Image (cartoon, helix red, strand yellow):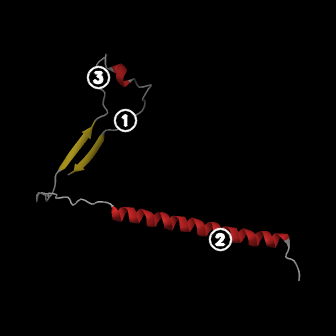
Amino acid sequence: MQSRPPAARFMSRLAISFVLVLAIVVGGFVLVNVLVEVKLDSANRVDLQLAEPPDGGGANYLLIGSDSRAFVNETGETAFGDESDAGGQRSDTIMVLHT
């Protein structure tokens, strides 16, 4: 009977170790998933009595923000800084809010 070379023994032990670690990790994930599922199923649930939304279909609001600092007086300039603090072009902001 011939003994296997050390490299082959190492590789087989490494493969077995990898399979065992993988099985433990997968088992851990399954266990955590089952425990979370049990906790969620046993949680007290409250049925909300929500009013039906109106038939109007919602409303859109246009929100506009300006980066102009033309309104700033001399005493307020220190609060905003100067062009060396925030140089370059700034953009205005336009957003649509749908409710």
Q: Tell me if 44 is positioned left or right of 87 in this view.
A: left
- Picture coordinates of residue 38 (x, y %)? 39, 65
Which quadrant would residue 24 be assigned to in this image?
Answer: bottom right
On the image, numbered disc 1 is attached to which residue?
Answer: 90
Q: Please tell me the numbered disc located at residue 19.
A: 2
Please state which of residues 1 and 54 is positioned toward the viewer in this rendering. Answer: 1
Q: Residues within 10 Å of mark 1 (few under 14, many from 20)?
A: few
SS label for mark 2: helix
* Residue 57, horizontal then vertical, whole percent: 14, 58
N-terminal of the two: label 3 or label 2? Answer: 2
Which residue is nearer to you in this view: 74 or 58? 58
Amino acid type, callout 2: Val
Residue 28 % position (x, y): 54, 64
Mark 3 lies on residue? 72
Amino acid carrying mark 1 in the image? Arg
The span from disc 3 to disc 2 (Cα, nearest Å) is: 68 Å
Disc 1 to disc 2, C-alpha distance: 57 Å
Between disc 3 and disc 2, the foreground one is 2
Q: Identify the residue at horizontal 30%, vertical 31% (top origin).
A: 68
